[in-house]
Image (spheres, rainbow, N blue to C red):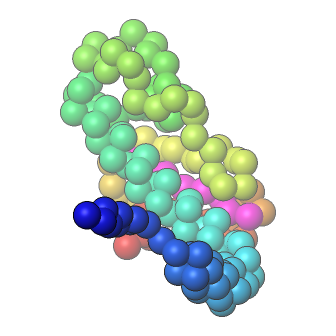
């Protein structure tokens, strides 16, 4: 009686085809991504601002208030003795925008929400246009 063995896995040819397809995709997609680093940084800043808004809402749920301007976002890392504060804090470190600058946090809001949160963008200065334009929580959709 003959024993037949079933080998399961990929053949060398199948692996080569997958590698070629991945290589083609990389050559098509990479130039588009690499050609827009500032656009990618701006998108990251918008996402981080949204995440910070959610973290601030959690802080308010636990403590009954938003951090003050003087406490800033640093209060999300270390408890200065606030009642109801989460035992492990809310963030591992004080957040920086994609350009390495601190996010601007103002509470109460000047723009009409509970707080204002923004990044000054590439130039690190208030205002600006194009790549230097500010990314503001009240303008993110």
Residue 47 lies, with reference to residue 133, above or below; the image says above
Which of the 4 image quarters holds residue 112? bottom left
Residue at the limit of the structure toward the front, as seen here: 1
Q: Quadrant of the C terminus?
A: bottom left
Q: Quadrant of the N terminus?
A: bottom left
| Magenta stretch, residue numbers | 115-122
**Observer-nearest residue: 59 or 113?**
59
Q: Which residue occupies 30% across, 65% down?
A: 2
Q: Which residue occupies 41% across, 56% down?
A: 50
Magenta stretch: residue 61 in it? no
Q: Which residue occupies 22% across, 33% down?
A: 61
Residue 43 lies, with reference to residue 117, above or below; the image says below
Residue at the limit of the structure toward the top, as seen here: 81
Magenta stretch: residue 116 in it? yes
Q: Which residue occupies 36% across, 41% down?
A: 55
Which of the 4 image quarters holds residue 13? bottom right
The x, y position of residue 20, in whole percent, is 64, 85
Residue 32 visible in the displayed image: no
Residue 44 visible in the displayed image: yes
The x, y position of residue 26, in whole percent, is 65, 81
**Observer-nearest residue: 53 or 136?**
53
16 lies left or right of 47: right
The x, y position of residue 53, in whole percent, is 38, 49
The x, y position of residue 135, in whole percent, is 56, 65
Which of the 4 image quarters holds residue 99? bottom right
**Observer-nearest residue: 74 or 91?**
91
64 lies left or right of 91: left
Figure disc tally: 0
46 lies left or right of 96: left
């Amino acid at each position: 009686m003959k024993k037949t063995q079933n080998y399961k896995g990929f053949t060398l040819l199948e692996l080569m085809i997958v590698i070629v397809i991945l290589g083609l995709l990389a050559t098509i997609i990479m130039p588009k991504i690499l050609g827009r680093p500032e656009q990618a940084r701006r998108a990251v800043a918008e996402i981080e601002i949204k995440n910070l808004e959610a973290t601030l809402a959690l802080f308010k749920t636990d403590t009954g208030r938003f951090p003050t301007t003087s406490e800033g976002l640093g209060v999300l890392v270390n408890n200065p003795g606030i009642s109801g504060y989460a035992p492990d804090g809310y963030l591992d470190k004080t957040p920086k925008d994609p350009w390495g600058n601190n996010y601007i946090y103002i509470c109460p809001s000047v723009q009409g929400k509970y707080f204002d949160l923004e990044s000054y963008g590439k130039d690190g200065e208030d205002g600006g246009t194009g790549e230097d334009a500010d990314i503001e929580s009240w303008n993110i959709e």
